[in-house]
Amino acid sequence: MTRLRVAVLASGRGSNLGALIEARARGQLDIDIGLVASDRADALALAHARSAGIATVALNPKSFDRRAAFDHALFAEVAKVQPGLIVCAGYMRLISADVVADWLGRMINIHPSLLPAYPGLNTHARVLADGAKEHGASVHFVTADLDAGPVIAQARLAVEADDTPERLAQRLLPLEHQLLVATVARFAAGRLALTARGVSLDGAPLPGPLVLNPEGNLE
Ligand code: GRF
């Protein structure tokens, strides 16, 4: 099987991208990262990519008169590397529905909540404000609705009494990294797909999201 080529979209610090790069370097993730694309030229993720020898592109949304025009331009750059998978890793923009449709089943996102709970921003603060006992992260296929596509896998984390939004985010982050690496590895092995009936694993419909176990594997 040829190695999966991945394009990563990131707007910020790029620690999830870093986790993919490190897993690949350790020999735990058999992928090529063909491109890191961003809506922010100053994203730390781009510096991370460059120092790992990965090609980068950044386009400024303000240079385009419509959101869709920006998306088409950015995804035209992404398409040039012919990725088998696009990973949104802290990519902070909504993507136009027609662009999402072009990549349906080939684009995933990592989100810091146990979806379908807490889509959108400020998830850690909202979890604490609600007094929720459990938090976590989800990797899902991207569909046109924000953070609402079929969930592939989740990492769960018990909320602690002295958690602040910052502490909770900090405790969750290493789990996000393991979750993303493990999910991309499953995809790279050709085991995951999006079908009309939802997520399938090894050709069979997944009854519910895979769960990250303490060893860092999905079960
Ligand atoms: C992560 O919490 C991710 O789940 C969310 O944005 C954050 C990005 O972090 N979508 P990083 O840029 O990967 O460090």
Image: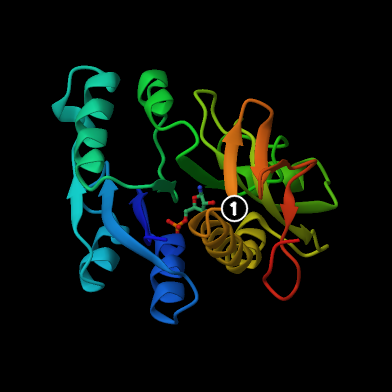
From this viewpoint, which residue is outermost toward the front?
1
Q: Nearer the viewer, residue 159 or 70?
A: 70
Corner quadrant of residue 55 = bottom left
Image x and y of residue 144, in percent: 49, 23
Image x and y of residue 56, in percent: 20, 55
Using residue 52 as the reference point, say whether residue 144 is left or right of it.
right
Residue at x-position 21% and y-position 34%: 76
Q: Nearer the viewer, residue 85 or 120?
A: 85
Mark 1 CB lies closer than 8 A to ligand 1: no
Residue at x-position 61% and y-position 61%: 179
Using residue 107 as the reference point, say whether residue 56 is left or right of it.
left
Decide: is 218 above or below 149: below
Image x and y of residue 21, in percent: 38, 70
Decide: is 140 above or below 156: above
The residue at which mark 1 appears reads as 191
Corner quadrant of residue 180 = bottom right
Q: Amino acid at mark 1?
A: Arg
Q: SS of the residue at dot 1?
A: loop
